[in-house]
Amino acid sequence: MVDLTQVMDDEVFMAFASYATIILSKMMLMSTATAFYRLTRKVFANPEDCVAFGKGENAKKYLRTDDRVERVRRGIMNWGKPILNISIANILYSCFTFGLEI
């Protein structure tokens, strides 16, 4: 079994930890950006979100799409798909490099 301090001193694991932190932070910031754009432009995806800005027919005018909101949302979707797969592959690589048991 490998000592945890040996794992933390390895360059491969430290690179993985750094890049994973950067990518996950970006994903969290992008979801915050989407929420910001939706609220400031009053553009919502479903009727339940529109209730805070109006009722009945008045709320339906907020149920629309906006190019800026969609651009941010597509950015999240394009990044979100491969991040989980890449993170799992990197964890497995780091574990097998040190002979750790999963």
Image (cartoon, helix red, strand yellow):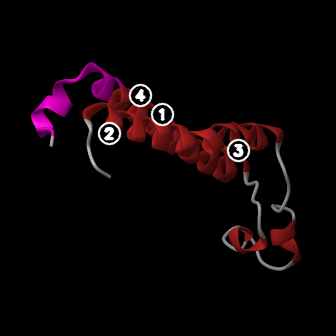
Number of the label disc, if any, that sits on residue 73? 3
The amino acid at mark 1 is Ile
| Image mark for residue 19 | 4
Residue 60 colored in magenta in the image: no
Confirm or deny contact between disc 4 and disc 1 (CB under 8 A): yes
Left or right of residue 47: residue 86: left
- Residue in front for this viewpoint, 45 or 97: 97
Q: Which residues are magenta?
A: 2-15
| Left or right, residue 44 beside residue 82 | right
Circle 4: element type: helix
Amino acid type of the residue tagged 4 in the rendering: Tyr
Task: Determine whether, in the image, residue 7 is placed left or right of residue 28.
Answer: left
Distance between the alpha carbons at the discs numbered 3 and 2: 33 Å
Residue 13 colored magenta? yes
Task: Residue 93: give x, y in percent of width and height.
Answer: 40, 34
Circle 3 sits in a helix, a strand or a loop, which is it? helix
* Disc nearer the start of the sequence (1/3): 1
Q: Residue at x 78, y 43 (%)?
A: 70
Judge whether 59 appears above or below 72 on screen.
below
Cα separation, mark 2 vs mark 4, equals 16 Å
Q: Which residue is mark 2?
A: 95
Q: Main secondary structure of the magenta part?
A: helix
